[in-house]
Image: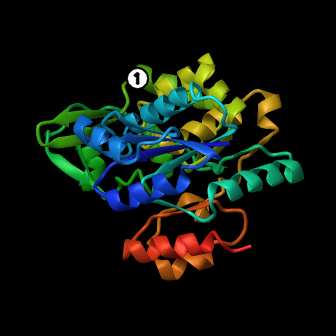
């Protein structure tokens, strides 16, 4: 049995409804954490009503901010109170299943029997030297944009922007060099980014002497015993506290924690494959492109785009293949 944890924000309700209905079966339980109003969560919960489905209002989530890891941890804590499941799979509301839940469970059992691996994560160790950014004083207070997210930077960040050297999404060694927090305003949510104070710099340098700097994708397939360890371990809480002050922490949280998991757990974790096409890198998945993706062990692809009824029919047809 599989526990599907869906984190959704935005307004793609048609696909979210189809996704949850498609995954609802005797083979799994579904938890939808909705970044929206309580009223929306209640409405969606009524529409998806069933013994295996829960719909809850999530924390407000800001892309690249600490709230993503907070919500991931909350979803795992919720899952351990749900009986009966063996695997935990986290999803966004725009993911597309390439096989049905029964086939997923069969594949996971076959993989475990064939390889000895019960959990699947994509990770890689960063070899580049860190680029530490020291705090240089307050900035102008001007709101800028990093991809789709508004942010306010300190003087050090603004100087990097002026020099054309500020891109912590692509320059991955910079992510751990920034202090990051979130601010909710009357008009929306934004990030606060600044350089590191001397004690913070010392803490981070000590942290990454202990742990390898490891990145990857936030999308995982985890055995229940791994989730239970992630929820209960004081070590994981300490890692989450420090990473929760960095930029884009969701792409290093699982990787850092599991790289230091107890040996009996770690030996069963495949750290090079998360069972997603392109390791969960988003793309425009349409009805026409879907069949070409359903090759190998991947269970999901992302993101849904194009005419959704045609995409959904194509996926349902795909599941019928022998």
Count of numbered labels shown in the rendering: 1
Q: How is the image coloured?
A: rainbow
Q: Is residue 230 left or right of residue 309?
A: right
Label 1 secondary element: helix
- Could you classify mark 1 by the number of other residues whose Cα lies within 10 Å: few (under 14), some (14-19), or many (20 or more)? few
Residue visible at 70% across and 38% down in the picture: 86
Residue 280 visible (yes or no): yes
Residue 206 visible (yes or no): no
Q: Give above or below for 283 relative to 211.
A: below
Residue 138 falls in which quadrant of the image?
top left
Residue visible at 61% across and 46% down in the picture: 220
- Disc 1 target residue: 198
Residue 293 falls in which quadrant of the image?
bottom right
Residue visible at 22% across and 41% down in the picture: 189
Q: Position of residue 312 (x, y in %)?
A: 47, 70
Residue 134 falls in which quadrant of the image?
top left
| Foreground pick, 112 / 26 | 26
Q: Position of residue 191 (x, y in %)?
A: 28, 40
Looking at this view, name the residue that lies furthest to the front: 50
| Foreground pick, 46 / 14 | 46
Q: Give above or below for 25 relative to 299.
A: above
**What is the quadrant of the N terminus in the image?**
top right
Looking at this view, name the residue that lies furthest to the left: 186
**What is the quadrant of the C terminus in the image?**
bottom right
Looking at this view, name the residue that lies furthest to the top: 234
Residue visible at 18% across and 42% down in the picture: 188
Q: Position of residue 114 (x, y in %)?
A: 88, 53
Q: Is residue 244 left or right of residue 263?
A: left
């Amino acid at each position: 049995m599989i526990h599907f944890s869906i984190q959704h924000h935005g307004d793609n309700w048609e696909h979210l409804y189809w996704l949850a209905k498609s995954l609802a079966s005797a083979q799994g339980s579904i938890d939808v954490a909705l970044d929206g109003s309580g009223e929306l969560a209640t409405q969606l919960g009524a529409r998806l009503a069933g013994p295996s489905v829960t719909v809850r209002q999530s924390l407000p989530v800001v892309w690249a901010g600490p709230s993503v890891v907070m919500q991931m941890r909350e979803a795992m804590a919720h899952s351990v109170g749900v009986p009966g499941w063996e695997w935990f799979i986290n999803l966004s509301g725009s993911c597309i299943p390439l096989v049905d839940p029964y086939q997923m469970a069969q594949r996971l059992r076959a993989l475990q029997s064939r390889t000895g691996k019960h959990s699947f994560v994509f990770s890689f160790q960063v070899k580049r030297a860190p680029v530490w950014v020291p705090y240089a004083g307050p900035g102008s207070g001007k709101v800028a944009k990093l991809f789709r997210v508004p942010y306010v930077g300190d003087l050090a960040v603004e100087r990097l922007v002026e020099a054309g050297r500020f891109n912590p999404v692509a320059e991955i060694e910079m992510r751990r060099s920034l202090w990051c927090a979130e601010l909710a305003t009357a008009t929306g949510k934004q990030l606060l980014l600044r350089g590191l104070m001397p004690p913070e710099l010392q803490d981070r340098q000590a942290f990454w002497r202990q742990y390898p700097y490891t990145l990857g994708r936030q999308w995982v397939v985890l055995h229940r015993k791994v989730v239970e360890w992630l929820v209960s371990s004081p070590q994981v809480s300490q890692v989450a506290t420090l990473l929760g002050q960095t930029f884009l922490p969701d792409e290093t949280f699982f990787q850092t924690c599991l790289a230091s998991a107890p040996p009996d757990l770690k030996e069963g974790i495949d750290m090079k494959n998360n069972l997603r096409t392109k390791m969960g890198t988003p793309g425009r998945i349409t009805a026409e492109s879907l069949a070409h993706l359903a090759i190998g062990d991947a269970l999901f692809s992302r993101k849904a785009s194009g005419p959704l009824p045609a995409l959904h029919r194509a996926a349902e047809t795909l599941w019928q293949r022998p």
